[in-house]
Amino acid sequence: MQITSQMVKELRDKTNAGMMDCKKALSETDGDLEKAVDLLRQKGLAVARKRADRATSEGVVETYIHAGGKLGVMVEVGCETDFVAKNSDFLEFAKNVAMHIAASSPIAVRREEMPEDVLERERNIYKQQALDSGKPENILEKIISGKVDKFYADTCLMEQKYVKNPDLSIQDLLNELIAKLGENIAVKRFARFQIG
């Protein structure tokens, strides 16, 4: 199939991947746009895994203030080099993550960082709900486990659906950026402040 510049442009607009990466992905998928998107996301994940153990000692602290100064967020995003820390794509990612945090109020960056008392309280609520609805004892743990996974998806920043594009999680967005910039990038921590 003939890969046109319009097809490449459309894929670039959808994924923010490089022009040659888009052209190659379209060639490998015989011009199927959706398969090309999936292929680029898989490659981004593979690149992110390869770079995950590299130190992120550079980066930025980005802020976002909303609602007439009634809501503010600070987020630390790390990278490997100061060159990337000054890159416009990196800075835009940090800004978008700060805005996302303001909009969706995550509790922790990753599952592993979820406070144990919060998790325990949620597990107890889910257990009581299951008991109250008459669910059999033998499937209680499976129900609780499923609800805890949903809780993580709603409250862990990296698992949340991105507010500007619900097809992607914050982790997907990060993987795309890592693939594009070619070095490890990590959302390290955040603070969200709200009046009232």
Image (cartoon, rainbow, N blue to C red):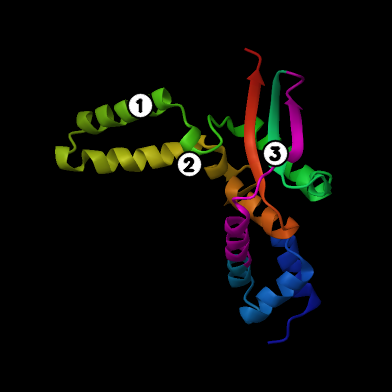
Above or below, 122 relative to 38 = above
Circle 2: element type: helix
The label number, if any, that marks residue 77 in the structure image: 3
- Residue position for label 1: 120
Inspect the image, locate mark 2, and give the three-letter code of the amino acid beneath it. Ala
For disc 2, the neighbor class at 10 Å (few under 14, some 14 to 19, many from 20) is some
Is 62 inside the magenta-drawn segment? yes
Above or below, 30 relative to 92 = below
Marked residue nearer the N-terminal end (3 or 2): 3
Specify the segment rendered in magenta.
Answer: 40-69
Q: Residue at x 68, y 39 (%)?
A: 97
Nearer to us of marks 2 and 1 is 1
Q: Residue at x 73, y 59 (%)?
A: 180
Above or below, 59 relative to 12 = above
From the top left corner, tell me how far across and down residue 125 is, in percent. Answer: 32, 26
Marked residue nearer the N-terminal end (3 or 1): 3
- Residue position for label 2: 153
